[in-house]
Structures are given as C-alpha cells and as structure tokens.
Amino acid sequence: MKRFVCTFILGMALAAMLQAQEYPFRDTSLPEEQRLDNAVSLMTAEEKIGTLVGMGVPRLGIGNPGATEAIHGIVRGGDADLPSLGNAGQFGGGWPGWTPPKYTNSTAFPQAYGIGETWDREMAFLVGDVMSYEARFYSKDNPHKALILWAPNADLARDPRWGRTEESFGEDPYLVGELVAAEVKGIQGDNPRYWRGAALMKHFLANSNEDSRYRTDSRFDEKLFREYYSYGFWKGAKAGAMSLMTAYNAYNGIPCIANPFIKDILIDEWGMKGTIVDDAGALRFLFQPDMHHYAKDVNEAIQMALDAGLSRFIDSRFDQVKAAWEAGFISEEVLNERTKANLRTMLRLGLMDAECPYDAQSFGSDEDLPWERQEYKDKALLVTRKSVVLLKNEKNILPIDINKVKKIAVFGNRAEKVLKDWYGAKPAYRVSPLDGIRAKVEGTDVEVKFQRWDSDGSAQELAKWADVCIVCVGNHPGTSPDWDDQSVQSPWGYGTVAGDGRESLDRRSLQLETEDLIKVVWQANHNTVVTLISSFPFAINWTAGHVPGIVHLSQCSQELGNALADVLFGDYNPAGRLCQTWVKDILDLPNMLDYDIRNGRTYMYAKAKPLFPFGHGLSYTTFKYSKMKVKKESDKVLVSFNLKNTGKRDGEEVVQLYARFKGDDASRRLRGFERVAVKAGETVRVEMEVPLEDLRLWDAENHEWALPEGRTRLMLGASSADIRLKKKVRL
C-alpha cells in the first residue's frame, strides 16, 4: 500500500511537471511581457494573492525566491552577540515546516559605512558579487531560497545622530549613487537575461531618523527630492535594480507605503517593474491610531498600498489580504499588475525556467563552503584595508617601525573582539585588533601588552612602559553592555550608552564615552595612536587636538584586525576617505527632524567648520596635482590632470571632482571621484569622464533636469575642503 501511495504521488508530480512544461510562459523564446501575461492568466485569485505575501506558485512550478538581509554580508543565522533576529519571515522562513539552514555563516565585510569610506566602486561591486554568490549557494537544492537581497541601502546619512548611519554609504548623493549602482551590478550579475540575485534597495524615501519613525513626516521640496534624497535610488534603478523597500515614515504628509511616487516615479518613470515591498509592520502603522492613522482599517490600508504600486507585504497574512480581496478592496486590474511585478522578479531569477545559468555555478562539494575559501577571506581583507581612514598622522607617528619600537601597549574595549551588528553576516572566524597586532609582531623581539581599562591607575603605568600606545575604542553596534562573555541584547529601541545607536534608536550624543581613557593614556605617553572603530562619527575634539595619530574604520569585518595591523605597521598604505562630515558639536546640527538639508547639513550647506571634512583622509605619502585641462564634448566633460606621488612610498590618492554651479545654493557638489594608484616618485595622467547627465540640476519650475546656465567651476582636490586645481567650463 505504501509503495502504491508513493508511486501515485510521484505520478501526480510528474504529470504536473509535464503539464507545466507545456505552458507558454515556459517558452524562453517569447518576449518577457508575453510570458508574464500568460503566467498571470493561468493563476487563480488565491495564487495571485499568494505572491503578494511572498509565496511562489507551486502548481505552475514557479518557486519562491525568498529573501535575506544583505547590508555587508548575507544574514542566514543568529549569533551569540545578537541572540534574536526578529521576524524569521523576512529571511525566507517563518512558515509551517520551515527549518533553519544547515549553515549559518557567510563572508562578513565592513559595515556599509566602511564600504562607503573605500570610495571605490570596485569594492562595492565585489561585496555585491560575493553576497549573491553565497545567496545562490544557500539556495541550491533548497525550496527555501534567499535570492532577493535586501541591499544596497541607498538612504543618505544626512545626520550623524541617525541610528542606522552604519547602513549608509555616506551623506553625499553622488558618492552613494555610484556605490549603490556598483553593488547592484555586483548582486545581479552581467547575464543579459537572468539575475544571480535580485537587488532590493531600501528604504524609499528620506528615512534617516529612528525615533518615532513609524509616524514621522519627512518634509522637503521637489528639488531636494530629486537632487538629494532619491538620487541614489535613481542611480541604482539605472544600474538595473527593479525592486526596493518603502520606508516607514511619511513624505510630505503621505506614508511612503501608500505614496503615489511608487507608481508615478519608481515604476512609470524609472522602470522599476519588479517587487516593491513594505517594511515590516508598515501596513499596520498605516491605520494604527497612534501611528500614521492614514487609513481607517486594514482593508483600506491594503487597498491604498496596492493602488499606489506596492506589490508585496513582508509580514501580512494571506488570509488578511484575501479578506480585502473578497470585500472588494482590491480590483482585478491591480491584483494582476502587482502579481506580474512579483513574477518578473521570479522570471529574472530563473525560477520560471527549466534551466538558469546561475543554477549551474560551480560550488564544489557541500563541504566546500564559499566563506571558508581563501579567495573570499582575501576579498574581505581587501575591502577592509581600503576602508581604513587615516585621520591624523602628526610627526609621522605612523606607520610603526618594529625595528625601532620594541614595546607596544594596547588599550580599550574594542581591542579584543569583532562585534556583530543587527544586520551583519555571521563570519566563520574573526580577527580582532589585538589578534592582528600580535600576529604582526610574531617572531620578532617586540613585546605587546594589553589592558582594557584604567580603573586603578595601572594603565598609566603600562603606558609609561611602552614605546607606543594603541587605544582601540568605539561604539557597540548592538547598543549592548560590555559584559565580557555574557551575551546581552539591549531591548528594542534602547541602548546602554548615549553615543551609541542602531535600528530603532537614534544617538543622544556625539561624545565618545571612552575618550577619558585616551586622555589618561596620552597623559602618560604622548606617543599614542587612537584606533576609532565605529559605525558613525564622534565629536572627538580633544583627541583630534592632542593625540598625534588617529585612524578610523567601521565595525564587523571578519578581517578587521589584520587590515588594521597592516595599516598601523605600514604593510598597507591607507587611502580611505570620510563619507560623512564629522562635526565638532551637536549644536552644529539642525533639529533632527528638519529634512531640509539647506538649513546646515552636509558639506554642501554646513555653517560651522567641521572637525574633519567630507572626503578627508591621509596617506603615508604625498601627492601633487598639476596641469588641469577641461574639455566639453556633446555628452560629457573630460577632465584631465597630472598626479605625482611626491613621497617615498607607493600609494593611492582618492581624487575628488567638485562642481560649483552659478546660482546654486550649495557651496559645492561632488561630481566625480577615482581611486588612483601611483608609485613613489612617479607621475600619472588622470582622465575623468563626467557625463553631462551628472552635471544637471533639477529645474523645479519645469519639473525636469537641466544643465545650469553660465560658467560652472570644476574643482579637483583631496577632500571637500582641500581643493588643489580649478577650471571653469560652460555647460
């Protein structure tokens, strides 16, 4: 009897498979639109509703793509640092019968803030490429896939108090847009028909405050909408991204989940015809009385969101949406359109075809894990090295010469561990700063001693003993207490230190809680280097004024310690640059909820002199700029100049091109950058192409992009405050 049942089930499955193969949408020679229309026409209302809540279409053999967080490594499991990851449904699970994946590791890169500090499109591409490869690894032969990557984050870090600054590439729309576009290409791959992973950008739009984000309203005009807040998303769409996540907040009074800009701009204007999702809980907040209260009930909220263009609810129940359908709140036309959008993502991922080239990728055996390959460890190290920013190097205290320095004292609460953030990958290993420093001097006569705190004056004694002191301090990305091996997660929306922040919690302070440790060590030994490992800027005014050496890098990379040691000891010449203005005082910032950046935000509109300017970063060598030429062609401007390495070390310079437009209220705007390697003593001719498209401003009167009239000043330099060459051009 058992054999008969099994044979019957196999027979039914085979019959269904053969039938599915006969459907027109299976014909890969047909145009995409025709295939999608046919698939929609074959589906029942219940199957269409299923796609709105993240289901596939099993009857037609169309698989569920699943999803995964992927800010700087795909998130496939928990971690002792952060015991709870919240709603399992957002990671491709959460339904009956779902079980966690066999593996939970993946390659862990620096936080997005650190990727932004590389100022390197190739690094953003590399991160996206690795993440989608590992997502395919997790998805092979697995019904619970992870092919929609919730990345990149195209939000702008307009204020350093924003708790999710760590997830942003920076404050400038051009820099962020270029890195977003590069990561999108890395995630989706270069196959003209299929995506390796679907890049789902987040969070649209103007989501850069955490406190009360479920009901706040980001208010600003059309010009800032185009030139600032949506610019990075637009660049991502141009690079091929068709999907994104809407933000919790409202924009000019209308919650983003139900805002007309979804259909009017994202879909119709930009061609983003893939999956448009809400953020977890956003549907409820749309009608909840103590939140937006924009809709009267859940049925009206579902109607508003779908009519606006949303195609998927992350955490809505099937029966909830079905009830709205049966009550007449969803039209058949809208249901078909939104289903088609979700199917488009499935089609591009190869889930509607018998074969997809990314299914045949060489993963090796089941035990040949990508994150354990040396190739991927090297990639994590490369990105981390490139992210290190040398903020200060007075009297060339760095790099450390182990032929002269024999006693090194390491201090601080960020020396012993690599911490994990809320949406970080779980690495298979972690190299802490202390590990990296000790490994660097292994086999030499250099002695390394460590002390975390100075509670009894002994740190000062250790500092006096040392030839050089290294103080490793910074935030806790989980806003958790430093209680050694006790794993404690701060409650949602709370933190233990005013200067820390994360999702659901904005920072209450820009002060570094551990700056007093730096003072104590420096008082005993002026040969002090501060390693600031943080997810955002701190107003380290005393440190910047007294300590001779300061480096910055972000949290979470599995290779953090090795990359840091390579820089500290001169095996790698740093060239990272700040992706955000570091202000001196919280009073230099407007009100947190003032989204009109013209009132004093970013390098473009700042009124106070910063502690460190946007684009700042030093090298162990020096560079000279000369012989700038500008030539305008029909569709671009060509800028060329000589760049000479005038020091004794090979190095990289991040050359930055700013534009000052006639009549513009911004002091300058970034419009080009390149990370250029130059050998010691050599001169290279650098050529930069700037498409005229990137030199346009938004004409609010005519509601279109337009080239500014008059002469535009183009400025080349090493930061927004360090301009070396200037030329004017008429666009």
Image: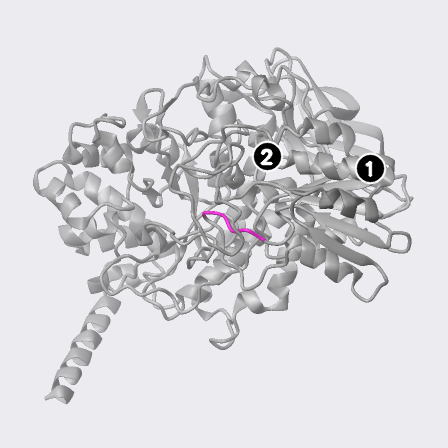
What number is the disc on residue 256? none
Residue 673 falls in which quadrant of the image? Answer: top right
Amino acid tagged 1: His
Residue 356 falls in which quadrant of the image? Answer: bottom left
In the displayed structure, 244 sits above or below 57; it is above
Residue 253 visible in rendering: yes
* 672 lies left or right of 69: right
Mark 2 burial class by Cα count in 10 Å: few <14, some 14-19, many 20+: some
Residue 688 visible in rendering: no
Q: Position of residue 395 (x, y in %)?
A: 87, 36
Residue 96 falls in which quadrant of the image? Answer: bottom left
* 326 lies left or right of 425: left
- Is 60 or 305 nearer to us in this picture? 305
Quarter of the picture containing the N terminus is bottom left
What number is the disc on residue 526? 1
Residue at x 21%, y 39% (from the top left corner)? 334
Residue at x 35%, y 45% (from the top left corner)? 274
Mark 2 / mark 1, whichever is N-terminal? 2
- Is 363 or 42 nearer to us in this picture? 363
Residue at x 58%, y 36% (from the top left corner)? 536
Start-end of magenta stretch: 418-422
Q: Position of residue 144 (x, y in %)?
A: 33, 63
Quarter of the picture containing the C terminus is top right
Q: SS class of the residue under badge 1? A: loop
Check if residue 3 falls in the magenta segment: no
Amino acid tagged 2: Glu
